[in-house]
Amino acid sequence: MLAFNLAATIRHDGQGGVADLLATDAGLGSWLEENGPLASVVLGHSLDASALAVNEILRQALTGVRRAVRSLFARAVSPAPPSRADANQLLEVEAALAVLNKAADKLGTAHLVWPSDGAPASRWSGRSTDPAALLVGAVGRSGIDFLLGPDRVRLRACPAARCVKYFLQDDPRQTWCSPSCGNRERVNRHYQRKHST
Ligand SMILES: [Zn+2]
């Protein structure tokens, strides 16, 4: 899922800090390569990710929408605490909604298309032909669809000490994003119990 994948570009760096996968041109380039096909699905037509210029303008646009998406993820998991990666940099809900809606607005309105050899389908009219604007629009639309859809209630922030991930809970008893986070926490707690007495 495009907006979810964008939110996941902020992650634990393995040393107790937070890494931003979009901070380097190489990281941004590979994210675009991997997620171009998902953007095409949202748009209803192919987005040529190779035509996107990897530059500061695109980075700012994507990180701006990412901040909005993560701020709304924080609201979705509340009253549980949000990911600690950016808990002190979240947008107010109204501001986050405005950023996400403005991004999605770049896609224009839904038009009906009906090819002679296929079924009727919906395609965004697009307010722009600029691939960067269409990508940002696709991310915005994807974020809206996620928050309106059935997966929102499964969203969780992993509570493991050094993990900053949002994940989708597969089972109501699932606490951690992954077995490795669960194992690490069990070891930590065992260690803390042993050393606090
Ligand atoms: Zn985790």
Image (cartoon, rainbow, N blue to C red):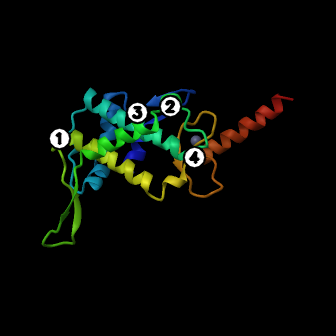
How far apart are the two marked residues, 1 and 2, measured between alpha carbons?
30 Å
**CA–CA distance between discs 4 and 3?**
19 Å
Residue for badge 1: 130
Label 3's element? Answer: loop
Callout 4: helix, strand or loop?
Answer: loop
Question: Gap between marks 2 and 3, in whole Å?
Answer: 14 Å
Q: Quadrant of ligand 1?
A: top right
Is residue 39 rendered to the left or right of residue 76?
Answer: left
Screen quadrant of the C terminus: top right
Between residues 82 and 131, which one lies in front from this camera angle? 82
Do the numbered discs 1 and 3 sit on residues whose CB atoms are within 8 Å?
A: no
Q: Nearer the viewer, mark 4 or mark 2?
A: 2
Which kind of residue does numbered mark 1 sit on?
A: Asp
The x and y percentages for residue 131 are 20, 42
Describe the element under mark 2 as helix, strand or loop. Answer: loop
Residue at the spot x=54%, y=31% of the render?
Answer: 14
Sequence-earlier tag: 4 or 2:
2
Dot 3 crowding, Cα within 10 Å, few <14, some 14–19, many 20+: some
